[in-house]
Amino acid sequence: METILTINQLTKKYGSLTAVNNLSFTIKKGNVYGILGPNGSGKSTTLGMVLNVVNKTSGDFHWFDGSDSTHTALKKVGAIIEHPNFYPYMTASQNLALVCKIKGVSKNKIDEKLEIVGLLERKDSKFKTFSLGMKQRLAIASALLNDPEILILDEPTNGLDPQGIHQIREIIRKIASMGTTILLASHLLDEVEKVCSHVVIIRKGIKLYSGRVDEMNASHGFFELKANDLVKLQQLLEEHPSIGKITLNEDLLTAILEEPMGADDLNSFLHQRGMVLSYLVKRKESLEEQFLQLTNETAL
Amino acid sequence: MLRLLNIELHKLKYSRSAKILISTYFILITFIALIASIEFDLGPIHFRLADQGIFNFPFIWHFNSYIAAILKLFLAIVIVSMMSNEYSHRTLKQNLIDGLSKKEFVLSKFITVLLFAVISTFFLMIVSLILGYSFSDFTELSIVFSDMEYIVGYFIKLLGFFTFCMFIGILIKRSAFALGFLFIWWIFENILYGVLNFRLFRDSDIPENIMQFFPLTAMSNIVIEPFSRLNFIKTAASQIGEELDKDYGVHWYQLLIVIVWTVIFVYLSLALLRKRDL
């Protein structure tokens, strides 16, 4: 698969503070990537470095096959980071026309892209009259002007109301369905979970995980069970070789699997031993639980 | 090159304040003509400035390039704000993300500044030619186009000053503070001259020799005041026993100092931009 971005041992230090520490990952064409991390974990700094606005301390990165200079490669990239930045005294379409001039693409796509983000009727309004949600959507339109190979979005829903968040997510989904590679930085787990296929998790500038969202946790999931005789149930479960840690929380037993097993197997195993369940469900950890697990493990 | 100029002009074209300041600047240059109508009526002394030879070729080149250079402050505001607004609107960041390199960014600003200086120079030439042909006592071609070094000096002076503004705009990032810094720098050069002249090196030309290397002094040295060349001032001066003996010429080394500063300012702007994280 074609590589879009390769980051190798990238490091950024602000004085004694290390914002990004030996970060390496690659981005392949066609996937939707999420960079996940708490506030101040180095997400924006990483994006800033690959987008030519923050100077790296050490390490390197290259776009595509590495044959173009960064600023030439950026003409094939669409990116918005943090705030939408435009000239307040220009209208939406004047701002986009300027972006076209910088990227060296023709202006005839302006209306088409404004249509995608639903701003076509406001194309002749000045940027300073826009609400935050509209500004953010205009930023997305501007990032799409060159039909980019990859769209980079840094906290695109930050500060928006629920309706605005929904609109932005719909737009992202629409763009992803057209086959554009997307890199989305966010501290919102459900946002990444809903939109992304791959995830890079960083904390304090250190990479904790990178790979598919659904392969993120090596664990085989867990069972939640209820029965009238919880003591006996717990004893039986402890005998089973596939089950590891068992925790009892009020009247709910949680049994973590150490190797793959279906709910039907467990059910017949218990039934053979005269145990009747009132509740049985097999679950995988949600991204949030996995994320907290990952970030806590290294905190210790 | 044209692409870069096109990008920068697009930014200026839609800014109302930039348009107002730029048009004010050019209108004020044409208002030099109004000096012609200044009349003094002091009892027995009655004269019109235009009749004192200020619009005579080739003196007009000196006079107009000196007067017009005062107005450069209007464009200074435009230039400082076109630099610092890129910071305050955070559009510099967006420009770079959109694929403009830092070098291209500085170059697009410098080309615009160069264009300002070129247009100002041509505009001043046209205004001077019109005024000269209307009021000058001599209109032979050889006289009309003599002393053109003042126009060259005016151009270099403007270019140097505008690049200085461009650099300050990038350095300070806020237009009001940047203009304040420009003013403070001007005071600094004056105080330094005062200290050198009255404290350290009395009665020698060392202060002038040192000061000519400072940017603002270097710029103002290129075209010095023309008033003491006027006949009625000379007469007045000799009446009070003062002999005015100044070198009014434009010298190559003065031009060179300002050109060197211009290069330094462009280079520093780029270096600053490269070094900074946005």
Image: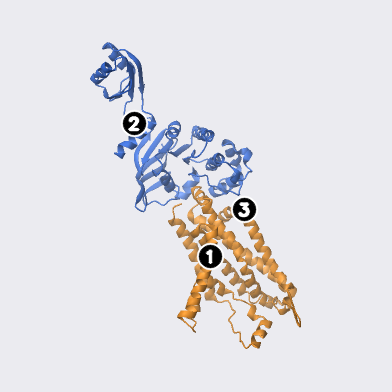
Chain colours: A blue, B orange
- Camera-side residue: B117 or B176? B176
Please give left or right for residue B123 compared with residue A68 in the image.
right
Marks 3 and 2: same chain?
A: no
Q: Which residue is nearer to you in this view: A179 or A285?
A: A285
Task: Work out whether residue A66 can be spotted.
Answer: no
Secondary structure found at label 2 = loop
Residue B58, image x, y percentages: 67, 77
- Of tags 1 and 2, the one toward the viewer is 1
Contact between labelled residues 2 and 3, with CB atoms less than 8 Å apart: no
Q: Is residue A169 above or below residue B232?
A: above
Which chain does the residue under circle 2 lie in?
Answer: A
Q: Amino acid at mark 3?
A: Ser
Marks 1,2: beta carbons within 8 A: no
Q: How many marks?
A: 3
Picture coordinates of residue A209, whole percent (x, y): 35, 37
Q: Is residue A252 above or below residue B148?
A: above
Tell me the kind of residue under disc 1: Leu
Q: CA distance from mark 3 to mark 2?
A: 54 Å
Q: Is residue B67 left or right of residue B199?
A: right
Instruction: Tell me the residue that label 3 is attached to.
Output: B15
Occupied quadrant, residue A93 = top right
Residue where numbered disc 1 is placed: B182
The residue tagged with tag 1: helix, strand or loop? helix
Mark 1 to mark 2 CA distance (whole Å): 60 Å
Distance of label 1 from label 3 (alpha carbons): 23 Å
Mark 3: few/some/many CA within 10 Å (<14, 14-19, 20+):
some
Subunit that carries the residue with mark 1 = B
Identify the residue position indicated by label 2 in the image: A217
